[in-house]
Amino acid sequence: MSDEPLHEPQQALHVEDLTVTYGGTPALWDIDLDIPPGVMCAIVGPNGAGKSTLLKAALGLVRPVAGHVRFLGRPVRAMRGLIGYVPQRHSVDWDFPTSVLDVVAMGLYRRIGWFRRPGAADLERALAALAEVGMQDYAQRQISQLSGGQQQRVFIARALVQNAPILILDEPLAGVDAATEEIIINLLKRLRDERRTVIVVHHDLTTVQSYFDWLVMLNVRIVAQGPMAAVYTPDNLRTAYGRQLAMIATPAAETPP
Amino acid sequence: MTALFDLLSSGIVQTVMLGAAMLGAISGMLGAFAVLRRQSLLGDTLAHAALPGVCLGFLVAGARDLGSILFGAFATGALAALAVMLIVRRTTLKTDAALGVVLSVFFGVGVVLLTYLQAQGGAASAGLATFLFGQAAAILPSDLWIIGGIGLAALALVLAFWKEFELVSFDPDFARAQGLPVTLLEALLTIMVAFAIVAGLQLVGVVLMVALLIAPAAAARQWTRSLAGMVALSSLIGAASGVAGALISASARGLATGPLVVLIATSVVVLSLLLAPGRGLVWQAIRARQARARISDGRVLATLHGLAEAHRDAGYPAEKGMLETALGAMPPAARIASLERRGLIRPVSHPPETTPHWEMTEAGHAEAAALAGEAAGSTRDERP
């Protein structure tokens, strides 16, 4: 399986001709996408643009009707464990009876393997990952007692504990307070500086320029992709967001004071 | 006491008790996963869909043979689960509607088959109706081996795939992104639930089976903080309900075991919802009451403290009417009495006025200052 010849190995994520439909209507249409390694990339687009679907299709969680996806030249099934995934916080039941540390340890279950339980060394690593997001004091806490921002940080720790070269985060800043947002963004920037690839679905156009260095604009099709300065233009924003734009951001804001 | 001893030494009662205990434990254990995965209603559909299988198994075997009856029940249950899955995937119907449709169609077919078989006559076919509401007394010593076998197999699987089942129950998307065979694991859990249902049919019947699956898990969730604790306690509650139901049923005439087991398990749920520390309604009510009292006391202290400061007189006697105006309404007498008891305020007279007055003690001033500091601190929320 891993003997397959590499396809576009110079790209952290390479997507070609990807089309996903939900009951006949295309959620993603003919996506061609390349994200180079070591960038911090935002995927933006209006509601219903298919941002989450793109992540899920890339990770093999939804089946595309056409197209293929490669991470560092390999199909996703050969890259399991090398991609850290942070799903949307609301996708799980936070009243599940478990502790913060146990949730983070779930990121190691694949490495631990079948029929074995997490050992002391595994819990040690989970604690270290919690410390990276500033949650080490909450290790034994029930997850039902966490605030939204804390839940998000626990989810990020669960992805960090894999020590993966590629991280994929679905709206990690949705519904978190300013202090948590700063912690998360600083952490992601540090990961980028370690030459890891960070791919984030982002919803806030006012911060996208200052947080990220690579941008993908999506609205069912790819509107534009590339380095932030080249892509964040009034024309592209208008194409992606249309009339919604006036309410979201002023596209001429990039002129320096 | 001797009556209980007589009961326990009866072979039939022992068989029923052991069977009920094992069935309760199995459904408790697997029900915990079903409840956490929000699959309780799938359990109800599987249980009702088992009825046509029971009849078919009887038809094929030509007698009340537990093995073939259970196999038939399992087969139609699996068919029903498949039908639900296909309806949800291929049509615009949502899961709840699909579950309802499949449940009623399969149950309808089952009842028709049942009445047909009974009209055909034969002594054995009369016993089939017991599968509607269960008849624990019909459990034979040889059945215990089948029930025990199912229980051991389920326990072995749960222990072997513990962390995988945990992850799939909590976050299936993440599990899939990790490369776990999520569909296979979910199917395994559903098949085990189907086995538990099929085994439990004899005890509680198709109509009430879902209660035996949900009730112990719902009760256990109230008391525990970990998945292991929940699964263990849920099995225990299931087993205890089974034993208690069997005992009560054996000690009085005309009380059916299965429904008793369900009623006992459900009472445990009600008690747990009310009393469980932290999560129980009673605890929450007490905590809300305490919070209200704390806020009310704090406002009284802050008002007196403010008045004393405004008058540059630590022992300023505040009149009842002033407190009433400042607070919008006079706090209940019990709260004032409690503040007096704690030595934070003390009643004083302030002639020539005849109305009640209170002044603040030194401890009261200290408490008011502490509360003010706390309030200022709590606005800095969520520090890392």
Image: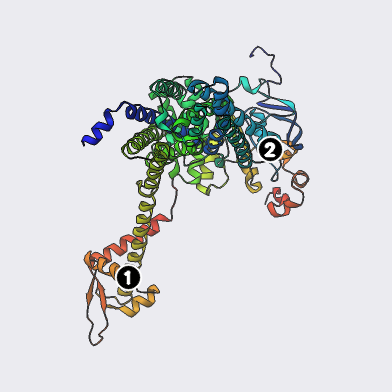
For label 2, the SS is: strand
For label 1, the SS is: loop
In the image, residue B82 lies at what x, y percent? 62, 29
The answer to which image quadrant residue B240 occupies is: top left
The answer to which image quadrant residue A232 occupies is: top right
Of all chains, the one bearing label 2 is: A
Viewer-closest of A195 and B334: B334
Location of residue A71 with respect to B380 vertically, above or below: above
Colour scheme shown: rainbow
Viewer-closest of B28 and A89: B28
In the image, residue B372 lies at what x, y percent? 35, 62
Residue A215 is marked as 2
In the image, residue B64 lies at what x, y percent? 49, 24
Q: Residue at x 34, y 56 (%)?
A: B286
Q: Are marks 1 and 2 on the same chain?
A: no
Amino acid at the residue labelled 2: Leu
Instruction: Judge left or right: residue A218 versus residue B247.
Output: right
Location of residue B375 with respect to A133 vertically, above or below: below
Mark 2 is surrounded, within 10 Å at the Cα level, by few (under 14), some (14 to 19) or many (20 or more) other residues, namely: many
Amino acid at the residue labelled 1: Pro
**Placement of the C terminus of chain B among the 4 image quadrants:** top left
Viewer-closest of A112 and A33: A112
